[in-house]
Amino acid sequence: MHELSLVESMMKELDLFLEKEGRPGLISIKVAIGRLSGVDPECFKFAYEAVVKDTEMEKVKLLIEEIPFEILCGDCTAKTKTDLPFMKCGKCGSKNVSLVSGREFMIREVELERSEQ
């Protein structure tokens, strides 16, 4: 399950970020996962829960934003959502399309506790 190594890498990146920011408390993490990224959102959530169990990060909420598979038509310029293996425009049926979204895997945002200053 490569989701486990992805979670571990994400937690290392977050640790570096928090260190740089003076170790504020973390409330939530929002991760964008594209349908074509090769990352299973449910497996990622399971791996996250296993990694943070019994740590200071256990109460940090994981939010997953699933990004659909979207294509752009080179003929009619329409953007349409589709599913594999249908790589054709949902508007005009052209196969002259390019991928717009669906491969993403990234930390989209983090919510930090406010400092009392």
Image (cartoon, rainbow, N blue to C red):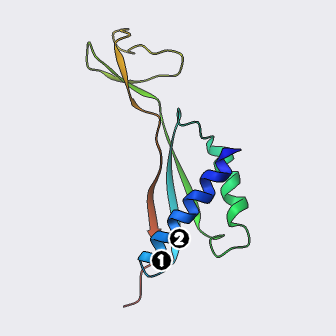
Q: Would you say the residues marked 1 and 2 are in contact, meaning their CB atoms lie under 8 Å apart?
A: yes
The relative height of residue 50 versus residue 18 in the rendered view (above or below) is: above
Residue farthest toward the left in the current orientation of the protein = 76
Q: How many marks?
A: 2
The residue sitting at the bottom extreme is 117
In terms of depth relative to the viewer, which is nearer, 14 or 28?
Answer: 14
Q: Nearer the viewer, residue 51 or 13?
A: 13
Q: Is residue 59 left or right of residue 94?
A: right
Residue 96: mark: none
Residue 30 appears at what percent x and percent y? 49, 56
* In the image, residue 51 above or below residue 54: above
Q: Secondary structure at mark 1?
A: helix
Kindly report the distance in space between the C-alpha atoms of the residues bearing marks 1 and 2.
6 Å
Report the residue at 33% width, 9% height from top. Answer: 92
* Residue drawn at (71%, 44%) of the image: 1
Quarter occupied by residue 22? bottom left
x and y, in percent, of residue 12 in the image: 56, 65
Residue at 66 percent across and 45 percent down: it is: 2
Q: Secondary structure at mark 2?
A: helix
Q: Which residue is mark 1?
A: 19
Q: Dot 2 surroundings within 10 Å: few (below 14), some, or many (20 or more)?
A: few
Which residue occupies 53% across, 37% down? 37
Of the residues shown, which amino acid type is indicated by label 1?
A: Glu
Q: Can you identify the residue that label 2 sits on?
A: 15
| Amino acid at pointer 2 | Asp
**Quadrant of the snapshot with the C terminus:** bottom left
